[in-house]
Amino acid sequence: MKRKRNQKISKFTSDVLRVVSRIPRGYVLTYGEVASRSGNPKACRAVGTIMRKNYNPKIPCHRVIAQDGLVGGYNRGRRRKILLLRREGLVIKKGSLRQKKSHAVV
DNA sequence: TAGCTGACGCAAA
DNA sequence: ATTTGCGCCAGCT
């Protein structure tokens, strides 16, 4: 069912969304990194939860991958996520990224 | 209010 | 190199 008014998002959520939206094209961050930059280094799972909710399609959530290199999940299908990443110049082998490109704080 | 879930991370076997 | 188990946190029912 649809909700008329949007739930007020937590500061953490807001921060996470901001961090992710700042990831440059061609770069990726891990869920853990995003969590750390959001103030809770151990909230990697929570980050996943937030991404899953897919607040704003404008947010490049496909640039957030797992620490082990696996692309992780994607609300619209892992396949799609991989496509997007390759499209940005990243090399993915069997669902995992060869070289992780993190960006220093922008 | 309390409990369950999951787009994770890491250590151990 | 792989697989299994446990911990952690915010959101949802």
Image (cartoon, coloured by chain):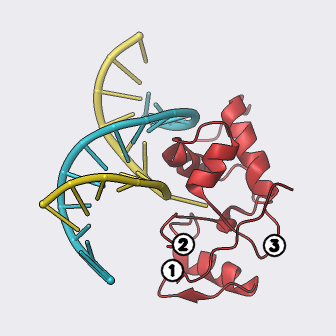
Chain colours: A red, B yellow, C cyan
Q: Residue at x 69, y 79 (%)?
A: A84
Contact flag, marks 2 and 1 (Cβ < 8 Å): yes
Residue type at the position of mark 3: Arg
Read off the chain for label 3.
A
Q: Cα distance, mark 2 to mark 1?
A: 6 Å
Residue A52 in view (yes/no): no
C7 lies left or right of A42: left
Tags 2 and 3 both on a single chain = yes
Q: Which residue is mark 2?
A: A71
Q: Earlier in the sequence, mark 2 or mark 1?
A: 2
Q: Position of residue A71 (x, y in %)?
A: 54, 72
C9 lies left or right of A29: left
Read off the chain for label 1.
A
Q: Which residue is mark 3?
A: A25
Q: Earlier in the sequence, mark 1 or mark 3?
A: 3
Pointer 2 local density, CA inside 10 Å: few below 14, some 14–19, many at least 20: many
